[in-house]
Amino acid sequence: MKVHKYYLYTILLWLAFLMPARADIGLRIATETGMVGDIVSVPVYVDTSLTSLNILSYQVSIDYNASLLEALEPTYEGTVSASWGNPVSNIANAGRITISHAGVLPLTGTGVLAYLQFRLKAQGTVYLNFVTGNQTIFNEGGIPLYLTNGRVTISPQPYLSFSPNGGLIAIGETLQYYVSRGTAPYTWSTTDLSVASISSTGLVTGVSPGKVKVIATDNTGIKDTADYWVEVVPFTLRIRDTSYYQNNYVTIPVNISRLDDFDVMGGEVRVGFNESILKAEEVIYAGSLLEIIGNKTANLSLNGAVTVSFASSMKVRGSGPLFFIRFKVDDRSSGGTWVDIQHAMFNEALKAKSYRGYFNILGLPNLTVRPTNGQLLVGETLDFNASGGIEPYQWSVSNPVIASIDENGLLLAEKGGQVVVMVTDPRGSKGQSGIINIYDGTIQLGDVIIPADGTSVQLPVYLSSDISMLPVISLSGGITFNANNIESIDINNAGTSTQSWSYSANQVDNHFQFAGAGVSGVSGDITMMGLEVFIKQGLNVGLVIPLNFSDLIVNEGYPRLLVEAGSVEIGEPTAIDDNFKDEIRVIYSPTFVKLENIPEDSRWLSLYSITGEQVFKTKIEGKTLTLLRSQFVKGIYLIEITGNNKLYLKIKLWSGK
């Protein structure tokens, strides 16, 4: 039994060795390249020898991307199946090629089975794939196939890249072209040199209305045409950049190039802008090319646009402003808008190239007013001037009852109060002064001299006002002083205009408070009241002790009086006997100043101005001397009384020549 098994195994081994081995047929599609527009031939190879395989027929189906390839009829010259004649091929179904072939003699050897033909349609990579199953077979199937797919890589055709790629120019204008992706130098041309010429460097110049395309050829012969047109138009419309002041009117011209060669007799232009910045008020023709054209209309009712149309039997000629638009500028201090040509057509066929302009709002400058502040008495004037704007200036005041101002800026004070001077210029720029204080009159503490050995001095309080001023019927306030120099202050109203008034007074530390009122009011230039100032002893000669009003109120606020300080000056000792108790009294009236109680040994009275100039000297006869106020210029004077001793005092002459 074991012997039988051994012989059977040996026989099977020999049978396996003597039987022919099964062969897989290798089919392969080649890999090819090309450029868009090329026709390429792609061989389909049989890589396995067909000899002794008794191949009498085959069918091959191949898929491809029809958007990139266009299939043409395959060719078979020189192929392994050429002896069978032309096969049956089907390329009608886009995206698939099917080839069927058969013969009476078996195929032998290796080589090309067929040549696939394609036109390359677009850039990309296309895979050529065998369709498996019963679509690709030999001898009705049953023979294993080893399939290798192929591909076609498609590159773009050589081309030139243009910059810019089209444009709009007017006759005589230029447009510079550039090209890349080629090999320099380049040769330039246009499709119509009568419309636009081009230089050897690519500079296009408009010649006549029309459209052209730019053509370039590189040094290797690659020739290409730009994709888009260069349009040449006969005119240009320009709006210039403009700036002007807020809340003003500005006129902007719409300028056009020369019209003479084109018999322009009608047209329409629409100008656009931001209506929140500019508001169109009027279209102006005076001084423009359309001034003499009779039939023209303007539409200002559009939001953010103005349309101007014209038609005439006359030809419009020349260049310059076609028309003007007058705008009101918004009252904001900054901002801007483009002003551009939205539409332009002439003679219903002629276009224009437009250039827009930018409008910018300028904030109005502030005007400078000088002087910035001041104080005046009723009847006085103050001259104002302005800078930073344009003349003529227009002047005004905040309260015309208080003051008036003329066209030249001269302010006249008319009533006590406060005003502000204001000015504007023709553009609307504004400015103003600070507060100008106007007073109906002055009330002033006098300036007096007391000998170093004196104990008290009469200090007058002067009122100076127009006689027509509302009379003063009450007066209250205080006087501050240096308590190291002044012992006290008291009311001494004898001989003053208010000696009949009722007064009350109180002193606390360095502050003297008083109040007075009367039945009959006072006004004009008078000594209104008197104060007795008691000086501390031991003060140095030449010391000036200032005295200042505080919280002074007249008639509870009106009339308005300018308050001025006074002083007591320590003079030379009088050397008058201590038993001499009389003191010189100064009495003021509207027409004279009277000195009483002049010491008996006094011989001469000299009057000096505040600059030290002697303006008057007279011999003293008796204890009384009267000075007529009309003899002296208004001011403060120093009186020197001499005899056995010298005595000094100051007086104030309010009215004079």
Image: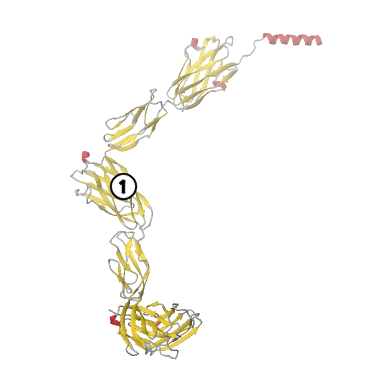
Residue 472 seen: no
State the residue lying farthest toward the front: 644
Residue 383 relative to residue 554: left or right: left
What quarter of the picture does the C terminus occupy? Answer: bottom left
State the residue lying farthest toward the left: 313
Residue 225 seen: yes
Q: Nearer the viewer, residue 461 or 201?
A: 461
Q: Nearer the viewer, residue 248 or 301?
A: 248
Residue that mark 1 sits on: 240
Q: Picture coordinates of residue 420 (x, y %)?
A: 36, 69
Answer above or below: position of 47 versus 460: above
Q: Picture coordinates of residue 430 (x, y %)?
A: 34, 62
Task: Specify the color scheme.
Answer: secondary structure
Residue 101 relative to residue 261: left or right: right
Other-residue count near label 1 (Cα within 10 Å), few / some / many at <14 / 14–19 / ≥20: some
The quadrant holding residue 6 is top right
Q: Picture coordinates of residue 257 (x, y %)?
A: 26, 42
**Residue depicted at 64% across the width and 10% down the height:** 20
Count the marks: how many?
A: 1
**Residue depicted at 33% across the width and 32% down the height:** 203
Residue type at numbered disc 1: Arg
Answer above or below: position of 433 versus 630: above
Answer above or below: position of 353 versus 335: above
Answer above or below: position of 528 versus 134: below
Q: Picture coordinates of residue 637 (x, y %)?
A: 35, 79
The quadrant holding residue 554 is bottom left
State the residue lying farthest toward the right: 1
Q: Secondary structure at mark 1?
A: loop
What quarter of the picture does the N terminus occupy? Answer: top right
